[in-house]
Amino acid sequence: MNTDTTNEAELMARFGITKVPAFRYHYGDWRYSNLQDALTQARRDAASDTHRKGK
């Protein structure tokens, strides 16, 4: 369903829908919706890099 911004506001009011900002975390080429997932991947990568350098 495509709506213009005026219609969007009317539809949101009618159905009690609210719009909120959403944070995104960027790590490498990836995008995460929560910080914990981004940190988990970054730590995995750091551990993998350390392991490779140790060889």
Image (spheres, grey):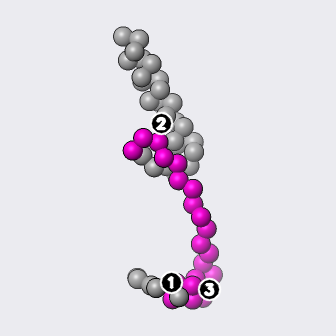
Task: Using the rendered image of the protein, determine whether residue 47 is visible from the camera's viewpoint.
Answer: yes
For the residues bearing labels 2 and 1, Cβ distance under 8 angstroms: no
- Residue, disc 3: 13
Type of amino acid at the residue the image marks with label 3 = Ala
Q: Is 21 covered by the magenta stretch?
A: yes
The quarter of the displayed image where residue 10 is located: bottom right
Alpha carbons under labels 2 and 1: distance apart: 37 Å
Q: From which residue to which does the magenta span run?
A: 7-29
Which tag, 2 or 3, sits closer to the chain's start? Answer: 3
Q: Is residue 24 left or right of residue 45?
A: right
Alpha carbons under labels 3 and 1: distance apart: 12 Å
Q: Secondary structure at mark 3?
A: helix
Task: Using the rendered image of the protein, determine whether residue 11 is visible from the camera's viewpoint.
Answer: no
- Residue, disc 2: 41
Which class describes the residues within 10 Å of circle 3: few (<14), some (14-19), or many (20+)?
Answer: few
- Residue, disc 1: 5
Identified at 62% across, 85% down, the residue is 13
